[in-house]
Amino acid sequence: MGIITIIPLISFILYSFILMIILTSNKTKLSKAFSLYIIAMIVWSVGSFLMKTKIPPSSEFWNRILLVGLISVPVFLLRFSYVMTESYHKMKIIKFGYISSIILIISGFLNFVTYDVQWVNGVFTYKLGFGSYIMAIIGSSFYVLALANIIIQVKRNEIPLKRVRFVIVGLSLVIIGALLNFNTFIGQFGVDIVLNLVNALLITYSIYRNKFLEINLVVKKGLSFSLYNIILYLIYVGVVLLSYEVMARMEVFNLTTFIIIISPVFILMEPLRRLIQKWTNHLFYRQTTDRQMILREFSKLVSTELNLDYITESLVGAISSAVDTRRVTILLKNAVKYKFGTSNFDVNNENDLFIMFDHPIVSWFKDKHDILILNDLSTQPIFKGLWDKEKAVIKDLETELMLPIRYLDDIIGLVVVSGRNDETPYSEDEIDFLKTIINNAAAIIENAKTYEIVKRQSITDELTKLYSHRYFYEIARNWIDNNVFEKFSLAMLDVDQFKVYNDLYGHSSGDIALKRIAEILTDNTGENDVLVRYGGEEFIILIPNVDGKDSLNAIEKIRRAIEDKFLLSKDIKEFLTVSVGVSNYPAHSEKLEELIEFADKAMYKGKQSGRNKAILYTEESLIEDSSHNQVQKAMKEAYLSSIYALAATIDAKDHYTFGHSNNVATLAKELATKAGFSAKDVETVYNAGLLHDIGKVGIPETILSKPGRLTKYEKELMDSHVTYSINIIKHIPNLLDTVPAIMSHHEKYDGSGYPRGIKGDNIPILGRCICICDSFDAMTTNRPYKKGKTFEEARDELRKYSGIQFDPVLVEVFIELINEGLIDTLPLENRLTIQ
Amino acid sequence: MKNLKEMLLNGEYDEIWNTYLGFLDLNLDEFMEIQERLLLEQLNLLSKSKLGSRLLGPNSINSIDEFRRVVPLTTYDDYAEILLNKKLDELPSEPVYWVQTTWKGGKNDIKLAPYSKSMVDEHTKALLSSIMLSTSSKRGKFSLRNNDKFLFGMAPLPYLTGFAPYILKNEVDFQYFPSTEQAEKLDFIERNKVGFNLAIKKGADLFFGLSSVLVKIGEGFSDGLNKSKSFVFPSNPKQAFRLVRAAYKKKILKQKLMPKDLFEFKGIVCAGTDSDTYKEKIEELFGIKPLEIYGGTEVAAVATETWSRNGMTFFPDVNFLEFISEDELSKEKKDKNYRPQTILLNEIEAGKFYELVTTKLRGGAFVRYRVGDMIKCVALENKEDKITLPQIKFLDRVQNIIDLSGFTRITPQIIGDSIKLSNLGIKSFTACKELGKNRTFINLYIEDVEGVPKDLVKEKINTQMKSLDNDYNDVHTLLGHEPLKITYLTKGTFDKYKESYGESISKINPTEREMENLIACT
């Protein structure tokens, strides 16, 4: 069997090999087109091989079979070229090709292409008919067209050169092969078959390289096994033949001697055998094996793990090494969003990478999709609603693929995978691997999340979600005992006037305020800062690596943020501020208890000096300073003077109720004293009496002094004076105590008052007190359109509305004051003659 | 993300279709969801800008309902101070382009509209969608390719269509005839001449421009071609074949040549008012039915026709869309203080007319903006193209102007001043737009001017209008079209009308009923 016969045989085997790869891969138009070309080549090579043997029926018959392949190859190659470049509009030429091929094949069987075909004594001879020239012209033209089509498309930038360069080389070789056939000497060697074979290999490589085809695992194993055995067989045969040759020269002809000498050679070749096996495995399914191993190792590693960080890091590591990706990011679901990092708990940071629950990507996964490919973001119209900011996050994450982490019906996280290091696309095998590993990780992640939540709950305050008092001591002691940080600051923060706030708006509003403050603290502190709800309305913040002024600046920023959100907000109800004291480790002390005490003292100092302050602890700053106290006193007096002036303004504005504020203050003071209120409350109720109508500066004078009934609109305007009052007073820290009383002096005991409609004991007691005095003064004051009632008449009215408008207990106390004649002794203005 | 050029290179035609035209698969609920999401993004951007706080008020707006309840409808007057002075620090996003248009009847001669990068990206996509659709015969199929030859029919910069070649460059390689660099240096007539010479040599695939301009270019080319005796050497066999065929038609058959004899366009996109009037002519000249895109300077691309060319579909991600019904418009007409209510896309009804109200998305400046366009909802779906979104037709500008050829806006002021300056003693008039075959006209109704021939009256008024309005002049010089028609009414017709109906007839675009009444008075 000479080379002339062997070439088609080898070609036939390799073509069959290629065809098997193609047929067992995913079916595409391209793979179908390529299969036809390969089948034609198989027919050609089979015919070529068999015509050079004595296999019946005859060499002439097998030559006709060869012609079937030879004639159809150019047509199918051109077809492949058109399919590859999607030049479907040129398929008319292919139809022409089919017709001409059929005519030529029939001509071939009728001896018009070749005749006198013979295989005699190992020599193959034939004569060319006129049809062979037509066949050569048509075939060559088709080869040229196939090549030209691809070159033109590349030139017109319609297809990248990178994608088709091997196809171009292959097609060029085919044309060369076809041209060489015109030389009958070279033609007998079947060079065109060899060059077609090279072309087929190049196209196969090109298709595989561009991932047009995905070879399935079973076939890969088969191919790998076959290739390994073929190579091994050829090497062994080579070694045997070579050894035989060498020993023959050495005149060793004894078979036993030969076997004894040659056997150790095979043992020495064992490393080579392993190398070949490794190489073939590497070529076909190395990554598959690696991935299976990674998957096993990952499962083993995290199966009993509860540390969320460790699990997610392991998952990231496993994915990165298995699919050779640049970056893997895991976004885990918390209460409000899918967020980068492993924490279950939300830390608001503008720069954080996160995906909200209403994100179209989440909807996409909820819609039962199990993967999102970057391309989907532009091709799926659902993503047209993406915000630019959301697109930026996807870009920042270098997203190429995204997969959900599903646990039961919930999506508990998202895995974002970037492009691969070698920029090639992910194969289906790799995507299947990702799905499997993520699926395996889901339950483990969910368990760890649950564990973290429980653990976190044990060390956090339920309301504010900040660390608890107990955990604070644990952390702070650790910082000090283990010298975790060289320096740190401890800030003690207390909410000013929180009691007033609670009295005024109730405890549930107070809780909401504390939650909001905790959020502000979270938003305005760093990742390493420790936030603690120390108790009630007290918070502690531990800030590592700062001291001196830096610590004060950090705290001042927080104080201002709270002031902005409450006191300076547009919502008039909000008046909360905080006073903060700061102490530093180790500058002030190395003992935790002392640090707390110093911060507490500094905070108290802030309270004393007018609240809403951040004070850094220094020994000097805490020394009682008489001049400071005098300044404070002067400030308070200045505040009061302004308030009195404002009160006078309102009284002057409403001429007929001149002195009303003074009267209410005087009466309220008397009532509070009689009712046994503390000295502080007596002072507060007096101030509240003076200020209770201060909001009337915002009411037009025409309404204030309008005789007769107010219209609905005017009444609404008039009633709004309460909120105006609060809006003015909330900016005067020393008078914040009066807010509850002022805010509630128009509330009625049965709940029919305004502005909040609260009733009974829910109405702050000082407010109930002002309410009685306000009504009593209004009843007994002379007005231009109505004379004031006598005290007795007023007393009857109070009794009549006791329990309806007025607090029944306080009414009785007030009536006692009237009955005892104490009211008569008070310096009230605009009275009727006392009877 | 890959751009169109890369996708075309890779032959990813299905992906291309989905990327640019996937929105045609949306149902109404999905469309509205996208609208809502992007409106919330826009509100978020606006709330951080001075312009936004002025328009939206002090409180944050978190829903469409709240947005429509709280934010007033706006006109260009509300933006003039900021936009004409290019006050960048007051805008919700940084503009990369300022697009210009005329502002007839406004405080200034021009209007400027800022385009952020994101807006430009969306507009580019929308424009490409239309170009792609113009080359499409059915869902999923289109023949647009890299290096397609694009005949330049666009306006110069800084007008909206003028931006097309510059913004499309980022997405795809087209060969412009002439090239953008060359086009910038040439005037309208020269540009067309150079463009067509190149197209004769190399062929042409795409064409885009205002409908009226496309007709003018086609006619001008046709005339030139029939008179020309010069020979152009084709650069490819296909074009050589067409030239031979054309020569045969001209020399042997002695037939008039048209652009379609020399070119085989893949697609033509037309825009502007009166597109309906010109489409037939464009098809006659260029051999294929153009595809209409509806848009404008302040609103960018709004809607596009699809392959059946039977109604336009809105782009979901360019503008937030609201509509004022005719009922609401008539309430407003009666009471200037009336604040018309809007409805959304999922509320419009087939066969009804609406004024469009848009909020520019992706960082645009215009909020609940009355662009001044009337549309008709022709159907709630396009069964032929299997699109389940409302189909619309762009009708015209709102009633206080007459738009000619898409770039000329005639106000009652211009007509009134021209009549006054003509010294013809004409006291009253009414003008309305008339659609002729392939042309639009202004029909000016005046009372008989005794002793002056009608042609002279027309010439005098026309001269004044041309001198007062450059765009009107361009209709003559650029398009070679004489749009003014004069209709005489008997003496005293306008007075009689006022006597009978208690008020004067509208000076511009009177209603059909008004016209009937006027004719009855003559």
Image: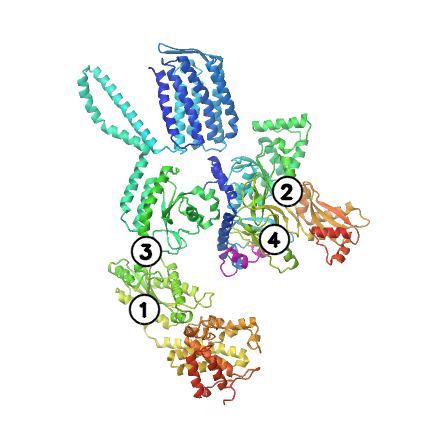
Q: Secondary structure at mark 1?
A: helix
CA–CA distance in space, label 2 to label 3: 65 Å
User: What residue type is disc 3 on?
Assistant: Ile
**Callouts 2 and 1 in the same chain:** no
Q: Which residue is mark 4?
A: B325
In this rendering, the answer to whether B437 lies above or below B335 is: above
Q: Which is closer to the viewer, label 2 or label 1?
A: 2
Which chain does the numbered disc 4 sit on? B
Q: Percent x, y for residue A498?
A: 38, 69
* Mark whose residue sits in front, 4 or 2: 4
Task: Name the spot of residue A481 as percent of width and height, x first.
Answer: 24, 60
Q: Chain of mark 2?
A: B
Which residue, given by chain and number where applicable, does mark 1 sit on? A600
Q: Amino acid at mark 1?
A: Asp
Can residue A410 be seen here? The reply is yes
Q: Earlier in the sequence, mark 3 or mark 1?
A: 3
Marker disc for residue B276 = 2
Drawn side of residue B153 relative to residue A608, left or right: right
Q: Residues within 10 Å of mark 2 (few under 14, many from 20)?
A: some
Mark 3: which secondary structure?
helix
Residue under numbered circle 3: A453
Q: What span is in magenta? A: B57-85
Q: CA distance from mark 2 to mark 1?
A: 80 Å
Cβ atoms at labels 2 and 3 below 8 Å apart: no
Foreground of the two, A50 or A231: A50
- Which residue is depicted at the point 26% across and 30% down? A275
| Badge 4 and badge 2 in a common chain | yes
